[in-house]
Image (tube, rainbow, N blue to C red):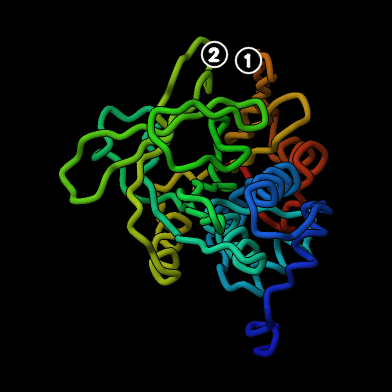
Amino acid sequence: MADSELTAPFDLDAYLGRIGWEGHREPDAATLRGVHLAHVRAVPFENLDALGGAAPSLDPARLTAKLVHGRRRGGYCYEHNTLLALALEALGFRVTRLTARVVVGADRIEDRPRTHMALLAEVPGEPRPYLADVGFGAVGSLLEPVPLVADTEFHDAGRRHRLVHVPHRGPLEMWVLQAHGASAGAGWQAQYAFTVEPFEQLDYEVVNWHIATNPRSPFSRRPYAQRLLPDGHLLLDGRVLTRTGTDGTVTERKLEDDAEVRRVLAAEFGIDVPEGLRLLR
């Protein structure tokens, strides 16, 4: 890719075409919710670059080439939320980039490092920013952004979320995103914890490289993909394919081999696996 392409302005028209957004472009709450949901529906979550031993590029032009113009690829949180941040800024929103500790299944918040990227988007004229996140690879992820308000239940495109405060040792309030019914028979479950401390692009370059290349990272060891379906959620974790219906029903199937994983990624996730990439280790 030429140097001139790396410094080109963000192509908002191409991005909105990729996600299928044909609504208005005013920086208001309706646009924020609509673009967020359209992105989640259109662009799958996947870790194939990391599985191939490379940290995916977060350069805007390369990111656009992969997730927007590529059409048959997705990405993980740093890619998705960097792309969304660029789009929201082009639409006129003010965006703060955050990091979070993924706490699904953790006994303590402090047991998990800050490895997830999320966003705060400010809507002109509204008193509180919105938590926006199109890159959380789990069934408990947000489908639409939610206002940064504690102890209030939000229904975002059929899912249930709330934000709560929890005590911690730092000077900033610790927020926790909770999802209701993210697993069978479960009530409110913590998804990730964050403060509103802003982070810069260089911070994500470091953590992106660590998550993609560390041999202990789950993203460098097995294929992981998710996709929002009209009737639920589809998840591939290694060779296990899990469908979660909107009614909470869960079905699992173990895929036979590398070839079947490749076929499922192409047919059901809309992801073309790079040639020569070994999916199962």
Percent position of residue 270, x then y: 79, 45
Q: Pointer 1 and pointer 2: residues touching (CB < 8 Å)?
A: yes
In this view, 154 is above or below 25: above
Q: Quadrant of the N terminus?
A: bottom right
Q: Is residue 218 left or right of residue 276?
A: left
Q: Which mark is residue 48?
A: none
- Relative depth, front residue between 245 and 267: 245
Q: Is residue 166 left or right of residue 33?
A: left
Residue at numbered disc 1? 248
- Relative depth, front residue between 253 and 259: 253
Q: Which badge, 1 or 2, is on the more N-terminal residue?
A: 2
* Amino acid of disc 2: Ala
Secondary element under disc 1, as helix, strand or loop, is loop
Percent position of residue 138, x then y: 55, 35
Percent position of residue 139, x then y: 57, 30
Residue at 79% from the left image edge and 44% from the top image edge: 266
Most extreme residue toward the front is 125
> How far separated are the C-alphas under marks 1 and 2?
6 Å
Residue at 53% from the left image edge and 43% from the top image edge: 136
In this view, 236 is above or below 43: above
- Relative depth, front residue between 63 and 175: 175
Percent position of residue 280, x then y: 60, 41
Q: Is residue 229 left or right of residue 174?
A: right
Residue at 55% from the left image edge and 40% from the top image edge: 137
Q: Exactly how many numbered labels are in the figure? A: 2
Residue at numbered disc 2? 184
* Amino acid of disc 1: Gly
